[in-house]
Image (cartoon, grey):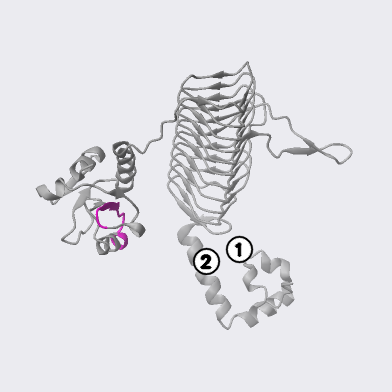
């Protein structure tokens, strides 16, 4: 693919537009941290633009209004990250990197006679497909996967090795389920009976994974509690490995959830939201469209649309950052003796109610940290 073809495919404008630059072959697209000569990258700030320029890439995708050092070739676009993602797709098509499996049913695959497998699908060794399931055109189910009853697998889906798709799951076209993922199992919902024994709730709902969504390796997506309810992952949503998505959750279109994040029951994640690594979200919390939650945040309350929240408990990023700085200054100041005196008067419990109290300060307050 030539650079001018890439610019046209993304709707960007080349600058400067010399003929030799327009005709240059694109070796690939990659992030600023890994860019090399011959590759195209993108930058969303002056900091990343300066770093990209140092690497001497073939071109850099930037916003038209950003101050640009002379020398490099630029692709001007109002949404550099979006243009970069679109460019990746077109490059994959150009290089023929999009996988198209050869139709095949392995002799060791166990397919129930009541299942319907398209002629163009590929089902590998030791796959189990139960009754009432439909596998669509050009779908691929890798070795050792287990597909339950009444599952719908759309066209061009890809199910990785040892993945488990439980009963009554619907995968729309182009969905990717990575190895070891479990989709559609019962959620963790228990109620104590009169004898004090936890009894499992009935999970009669469905699990729906919309078009082109991706579920990472060893991630769990639970089915919905309640007849007629559903757990839903929106179209083009990307869920990393080792993520827990509980019953009745909804993840909006285009959202991204990083590894080791946990969503409790009935959480709603809006469209194009980003949850970074190790985020924990309380039940029935709503995270708004286009919002960002920083790594290791604990989300107790709703996050408004378009906001960035960080910290534990999660708060607007500016407030959370100021609180951390304040605590550090407090720890290093001469006010600690005063806090010890307050502790004697009011006790530890009241001091712990000070918002932002951190375990790191326990030793300074004279508490037993063992």
Which residue reaches farthest top? 114
Residue 89 appearing in the image: yes
Q: Nearer the viewer, residue 306 or 132?
A: 132
Residue at 33 percent across and 36 percent down: it is 96
Please identify the quarter of the rendering in which residue 71 is found: bottom left
Residue at 47 percent across and 39 percent down: it is 237
User: How far from the left and from the top, in percent, is residue 23?
Assistant: 15, 45
User: How far from the left and from the top, in percent, is residue 289?
Assistant: 45, 42
Residue at 26 percent across and 64 percent down: it is 54
Residue at 68 percent across and 34 percent down: it is 186
Residue 154 appearing in the image: no
Position above or below: 281 against 211: below
User: How far from the left and from the top, in percent, is residue 60?
Assistant: 25, 53
Dots 2, 1 in contact, CB < 8 A: yes
Which segment is the magenta one?
Answer: 37-48
Q: Label 1, on which residue?
A: 355
Using the image, tell me which numbered label, if any, was put on residue 323: 2
Upstream in the sequence, badge 2 or badge 1?
A: 2
Q: Quadrant of the N terminus?
A: top left
| Residue 197: in magenta span | no
Q: Secondary structure at mark 1?
A: loop
Position above or below: 15 against 353: above
Position above or below: 184 against 365: above
* Alpha carbon distance from label 2 to label 1: 9 Å
Apparent side of residue 307 relative to residue 228 in the rendered image (left or right): left
User: How far from the left and from the top, in percent, is residue 124?
Assistant: 55, 31
* Circle 2 Cα neighbour tier, 10 Å, few/some/many (<14 / 14–19 / ≥20): some
Which residue reaches farthest left? 19
Q: Secondary structure at mark 2?
A: helix
């Amino acid at each position: 693919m030539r650079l001018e073809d890439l610019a046209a495919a993304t709707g960007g404008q080349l600058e400067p537009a010399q003929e030799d630059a327009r005709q240059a072959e694109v070796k690939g697209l990659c992030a600023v941290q890994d860019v090399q000569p011959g590759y195209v990258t993108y930058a969303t700030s002056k900091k990343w633009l300066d770093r990209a320029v140092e690497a001497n890439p073939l071109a850099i995708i930037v916003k038209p209004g950003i101050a640009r050092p002379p020398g490099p070739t630029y692709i001007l676009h109002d949404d550099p990250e979006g243009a970069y993602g679109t460019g990746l797709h077109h490059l994959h098509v150009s290089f023929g990197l999009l996988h198209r499996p050869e139709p095949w049913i392995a002799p060791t695959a166990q397919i129930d006679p009541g299942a319907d497998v398209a002629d163009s699908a590929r089902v590998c060794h030791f796959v189990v497909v139960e009754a009432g399931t439909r596998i669509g055109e050009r779908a691929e189910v890798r070795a050792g996967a287990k597909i339950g009853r009444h599952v719908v697998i759309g066209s061009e889906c890809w199910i990785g090795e040892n993945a488990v798709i439980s009963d009554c799951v619907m995968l729309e076209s182009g969905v990717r389920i990575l190895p070891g993922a479990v989709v559609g199992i019962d959620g963790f919902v228990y109620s104590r009976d009169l004898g004090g024994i936890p009894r499992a709730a009935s999970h009669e709902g469905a699990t729906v994974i919309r078009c082109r969504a991706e579920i990472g390796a060893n991630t769990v997506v639970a089915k919905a509690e309640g007849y007629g309810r559903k757990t839903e992952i929106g179209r083009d949503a990307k869920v990393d490995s080792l993520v827990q998505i509980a019953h009745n959750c909804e993840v909006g279109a285009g959202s991204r959830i990083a590894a080791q994040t946990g969503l409790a029951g009935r959480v709603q994640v809006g469209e194009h939201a980003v949850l970074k690594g190790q985020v924990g979200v309380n039940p029935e919390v709503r995270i708004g469209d286009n919002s960002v939650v920083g790594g290791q945040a604990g989300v107790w309350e709703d996050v408004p649309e378009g906001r960035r929240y960080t910290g534990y408990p999660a708060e607007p990023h500016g407030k959370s950052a100021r609180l951390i700085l304040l605590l550090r200054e407090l720890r290093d100041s001469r006010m600690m003796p005063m806090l010890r005196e307050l502790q004697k008067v009011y006790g530890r419990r009241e001091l712990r109610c000070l918002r932002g109290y951190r375990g790191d300060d326990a030793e300074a307050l004279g508490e037993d940290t063992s």
